[in-house]
Image (cartoon, coloured by chain):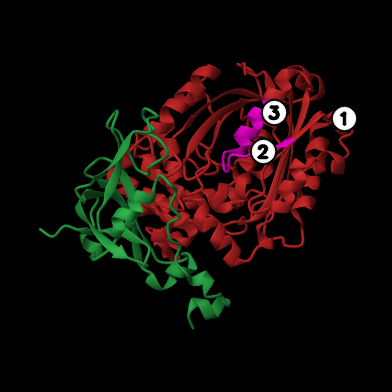
Chain colours: A green, B red
């Protein structure tokens, strides 16, 4: 018996949460849909904010642009979820959640996919892959760079 | 606040655990009466009643901000009532609110109440709340992250950078459980743990087993705060707030001020240093270290920041037994979220109340003989901030 039947959960309980973009983050998700990883960069001071906010957190300017990231990063730290996860993720266990530092300096939480647990190592090179999780959303995920 | 300007003179606490029949209102009224009695004051002396937030408790929170509590406990001369919250750091922010009220001179007696009843919610309700509370709903949640995974990630990064072993991480749980076994109100105070038992538990978020993850529980506590002048008049052994220091880091862990996973204590150390300096005391003067970690690795990072061991080697200190009952550095003497139980915004209240009991010589089997000074901390969010406080039963 699956977790849904076991706990008498509804179909709605089993739907994976998707981002709820704000007006200042919408371009990020529009771009991932086109399989482009972009970051919000201030045109006045050059600061990159991720997560993005309404205005630059360094100089408070509204003057910004979305620049394409290299899609390269490194693994900072990770965990492997094996139990007590939100119900929509139950059937995915075990899965890796990780903190990734992009070449541009900002960090994000994501999943590592196409991995072998023994080869995961903090500091290792990763590259972005795009997971089209629904018609509306594409999540950037990461995989180890093959030598 | 100036050194020792304010004091805590009485505390109350109910047993922590699963008590579905005991409502959060019953807890609040009960701990209030206990704290007033323990302080030895008249309830009508109380001029302000401050309440902590009940996690997921819309009715309770509404009642609190609509002034239910002064009426229910019969505080006839109450002038001010409010709710103050900063999640896990609430015991600190509510205390600062109390200090402001006392400083204003409107009253010289403030009652602070915390109550939580998680057992009224279904697993699904709590899973939904905590799935989104700890992490960013837009940037983290779609990846299936959990609070436990966040702590697991910090644990993995810390172990990798410092060489701390998983046995040393487990030793924190063992030590907390030993203290909890000396506490009548602890949720998990019946049976000691061993490193082997902790490591053989169900893996929840590698490298954390179920024994390394805190458990939500019902509970509550209260305390009475007053000015130094009144404290000296009405209380035999007031506990003075000697100093504190604070810093804020982030909402999401990816924006943390300190980026090196091996040196997360470098965010905390300047805060501890400032608190010590303001009290005119040093780490060697501390008799007890009430560290609110909520996960074992956080306790180690906190201990790293105090300098009891070389940075990154606090795991060895804990494994040596020196932080356990009878050790040289009594740490987290109520067993904390890991073994006392996680009461929502109340973990910090529990540790503050325990600090006061220790300094008043009322800590029962957990009493550290002759304790004079304690360093205590609290923090909220997903490790968003930290506040160190130094308390003493004398003003140095």
Both marks 2 and 3 on one chain: yes
Please tell me the numbered disc located at residue B129.
none
Residue B89 belongs to magenta span: yes
Which-is-in-front pick, marks 2 and 3? 3
Residue B152: give x, y in percent of width and height. 39, 54
Which residue is disc 3 drawn over? B98
Please tell me the numbered disc located at residue B353.
2
Q: Nearer the viewer, residue A86 or A38?
A: A38
- In the shown orientation, is residue B73 left or right of residue A19? right
Spatial CA span between label 1 and label 2? 25 Å
Q: Residues within 10 Å of mark 3 (few under 14, many from 20)?
A: many
Which residue is disc 1 drawn over? B77
- In the shown orientation, is residue A31 left or right of residue B82? left
Among the two numbered marks 1 and 2 on one chain, the one whose residue lies closer to the N terminus: 1
Q: Nearer the viewer, residue B336 or B83?
A: B83
Q: Nearer the viewer, residue B129 or A129?
A: A129
- In the shown orientation, is residue B330 left or right of residue B250? right
Please indicate, yes or no, whether residue B308 appears anywhere in the rendered image.
no
Chain to which mark 2 belongs:
B
Residue A91: give x, y in percent of width and height. 41, 73
B229 over B184 or under it: above or below: above
Q: Quadrant of residue B320?
A: top left
B246 over B295 or under it: above or below: above
In the image as oriented, which residue stretches furthest toward the bottom? A1
Q: Quadrant of residue B9?
A: top right
Q: Which quarter of the image is occupied by the C terminus of chain A?
A: bottom left
What's drawn in magenta, residue-wise?
Answer: B82-99
Which secondary structure lies at badge 3? helix
Spatial CA span between label 3 and label 1? 16 Å
């Amino acid at each position: 018996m699956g977790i849904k039947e076991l706990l008498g959960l509804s179909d709605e309980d089993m739907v994976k949460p998707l981002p709820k973009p704000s007006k200042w983050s919408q371009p990020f998700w529009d771009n991932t849909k086109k399989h482009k990883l972009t970051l919000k960069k201030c045109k006045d001071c050059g600061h990159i904010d991720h997560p993005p906010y309404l205005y630059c957190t360094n100089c408070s300017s509204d003057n910004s642009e979305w620049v394409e990231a290299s899609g390269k990063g490194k693994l900072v730290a990770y965990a492997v979820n094996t139990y007590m996860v939100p119900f929509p993720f139950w059937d995915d266990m075990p899965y890796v959640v990780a903190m990734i530092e992009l070449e541009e300096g900002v960090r994000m939480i994501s999943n590592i996919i196409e991995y072998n647990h023994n080869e995961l190592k903090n500091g290792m090179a990763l590259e972005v892959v795009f997971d089209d999780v629904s018609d509306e959303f594409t999540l950037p995920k990461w995989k180890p760079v093959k030598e | 606040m100036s050194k020792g300007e304010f004091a805590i003179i009485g505390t109350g606490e109910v047993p922590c655990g699963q008590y579905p029949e005991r409502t959060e209102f019953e807890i609040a009224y009960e701990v209030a009466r206990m704290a007033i009695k323990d302080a030895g004051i008249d309830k009508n002396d109380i001029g302000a009643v401050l309440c902590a937030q009940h996690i997921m408790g819309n009715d309770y929170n509404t009642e609190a901000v609509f002034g239910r509590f002064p009426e229910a406990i019969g505080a006839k001369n109450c002038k001010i009532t409010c709710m103050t919250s900063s999640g896990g750091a609430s015991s600190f922010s509510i205390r600062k609110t109390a200090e402001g009220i006392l400083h204003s001179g409107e009253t010289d007696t403030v009652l602070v109440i915390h109550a939580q009843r998680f057992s009224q919610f279904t697993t699904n309700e709590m899973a939904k709340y905590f799935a989104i509370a700890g992490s960013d709903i837009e940037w983290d949640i779609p990846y299936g992250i959990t609070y436990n995974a966040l702590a697991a990630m910090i644990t993995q990064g810390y172990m990798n950078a410092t060489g701390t072993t998983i046995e040393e991480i487990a030793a924190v749980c063992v030590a907390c459980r030993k203290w909890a076994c000396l506490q009548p109100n602890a949720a998990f105070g019946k049976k000691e743990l061993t490193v082997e038992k902790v490591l053989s538990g169900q893996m929840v978020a590698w490298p954390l087993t179920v024994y390394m993850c805190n458990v939500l529980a019902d509970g509550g506590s209260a305390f009475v705060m007053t000015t130094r002048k009144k404290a000296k008049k009405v209380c035999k052994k007031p506990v003075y707030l000697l100093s504190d220091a604070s810093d804020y880091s982030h909402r999401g862990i990816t924006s943390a001020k300190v980026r090196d996973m091996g040196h997360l204590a470098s965010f905390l150390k300047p805060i501890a240093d400032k608190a010590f300096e303001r009290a005119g005391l040093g780490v060697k003067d501390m008799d007890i270290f009430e560290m609110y970690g909520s996960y074992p690795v956080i306790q180690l990072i906190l201990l790293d920041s105090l300098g009891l061991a070389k940075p990154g080697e606090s795991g060895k200190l804990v494994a040596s037994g020196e932080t356990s009952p009878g050790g040289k550095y009594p740490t987290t003497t109520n067993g904390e979220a890991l073994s006392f139980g996680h009461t929502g915004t109340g973990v910090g209240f529990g540790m503050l109340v325990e600090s006061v009991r220790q300094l008043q010589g009322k800590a029962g089997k957990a009493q550290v003989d002759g304790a004079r000074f304690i360093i205590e901390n609290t923090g909220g969010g997903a490790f968003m901030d930290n506040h160190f406080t130094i308390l003493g039963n004398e003003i140095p």
